[in-house]
Image (tube, rainbow, N blue to C red):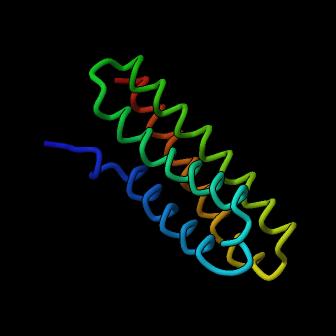
Amino acid sequence: MLCFEDLEAWQFARAQVLAVYGLCGGEPLSRDFGLKDQIQRSSVSVMTNIAEGFERTGNKEKLHFYNIARASCGETRSLLYVVTDVYSSLSEQSDAIRLESVHVGKVISGLIRSTRES
């Protein structure tokens, strides 16, 4: 039986959370509590909304949560631009996570598309 952990979108979102937490754990971002907390929350939101959507029984509900996940992915990408712009020492790491976040968003879009078609 398929579970949310089997979804590629959730797996990629989980990897993104680990990357974001790694980025936020070091200096100087670890001391920027507002930005650090917001980017961590938005990345966790991607992963958790995919899981919550999967566990819903109706497609309308599933799509609602998958769309929230996609929006949170966009929020994470936007916040990664802030990291790049404000903390030049983290720009390479931030840019790499942002590129992965684009991929996560595309996979979520595919999940939304396949849910609509089912």
Residue 26 in which image quadrant = bottom right
In-image side of 31 versus 69 (left or right): right
Whole-percent x, y for residue 116 in the image: 43, 23
Q: Quadrant of the C terminus?
A: top left
| Vertical arrangement, residue 13 with respect to residue 15, above or below | above
| Vertical arrangement, residue 109 with respect to residue 88, above or below | above
Whole-percent x, y for residue 111 in the image: 44, 38
Q: Residue at x 71, y 71 (%)?
A: 31
The number of discs equals 0
The residue furthest left is: 1
Residue 61 in which image quadrant = top left
Q: Residue at x 44, y 38 (%)?
A: 49
Q: Nearer the viewer, residue 35 or 85?
A: 35
Q: Residue at x 63, y 56 (%)?
A: 37
Q: Quadrant of the N terminus?
A: top left
| Vertical arrangement, residue 68 with respect to residue 105, above or below | above
| Vertical arrangement, residue 67 with respect to residue 45, above or below | above
In-image side of 31 versus 46 (left or right): right
In-image side of 40 versus 89 (left or right): left
Whole-percent x, y for residue 67 in the image: 54, 31
Q: Residue at x 41, y 32 (%)?
A: 114
